[in-house]
Image (tube, rainbow, N blue to C red):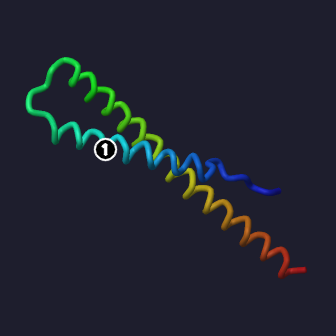
């Protein structure tokens, strides 16, 4: 049985990009903030949601990729053990 990874490379890159883009945009907003108006507060809320989603996605992708690597390594050990005993 062949194990298939849960996350594609594109999804992994997108998760990291979302997190870092949110942090970057939030930093730009903080740098340019002298006094916050209502529309600026909305911008900060939107960016903080982006950062939260990016952080959750990044954590999920990192955990899933680590688990997938362990499963694939275990299958490879099992396969090599089966081939050496024949």
Q: Position of residue 64 (x, y in %)?
A: 56, 50
Residue farthest along the top direction in this orientation:
38
Residue farthest along the front direction in this orientation:
32
In-image side of 30 versus 35 (left or right): right
In-image side of 32 versus 46 (left or right): left
- Quadrant of the image containing the N terminus: bottom right
Task: Answer above or below: position of 76 versus 22.
Answer: below
- Residue wearing tag 1: 23
Q: Nearer the viewer, residue 15 or 81?
A: 15
Q: Residue at x 67, y 52 (%)?
A: 5
Residue farthest along the right direction in this orientation:
86
Q: Position of residue 4 (x, y in %)?
A: 72, 52
Task: Answer above or below: position of 59 versus 44.
Answer: below
Residue 66 appears in view: yes
Q: Position of residue 18 (x, y in %)?
A: 43, 42
Q: Residue at x 66, y 67 (%)?
A: 73
Q: Residue at x 26, y 39 (%)?
A: 26
Q: Residue at x 18, y 39 (%)?
A: 30
- Quadrant of the image containing the C terminus: bottom right
Give the crowd class for mark 1: few <14, some 14-19, many >=20 residues within 10 Å: some
Task: Answer above or below: position of 61 versus 76.
Answer: above
In-image side of 83 versus 74 (left or right): right
Q: Nearer the viewer, residue 28 or 17?
A: 28
SS of the residue under disc 1: helix
Residue 59 appears in view: no
Q: What is the tally of numbered marks visible in this picture?
A: 1
Residue farthest along the left direction in this orientation:
34
Q: Quadrant of residue 22?
A: top left
Q: Position of residue 53 (x, y in %)?
A: 42, 36
In-image side of 5 versus 33 (left or right): right
Q: Nearer the viewer, residue 2 or 7?
A: 7
């Amino acid at each position: 049985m062949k194990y298939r990874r849960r996350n594609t490379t594109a999804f992994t890159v997108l998760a990291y990009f979302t997190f870092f883009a949110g942090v970057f945009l939030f930093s730009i907003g903080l740098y340019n903030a002298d006094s916050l108006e209502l529309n600026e507060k909305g911008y900060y809320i939107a960016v903080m949601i982006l950062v939260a989603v990016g952080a959750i996605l990044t954590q999920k992708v990192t955990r899933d990729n680590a688990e997938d690597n362990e499963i694939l390594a275990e299958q490879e050990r099992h396969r090599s053990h089966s081939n050496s005993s024949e």
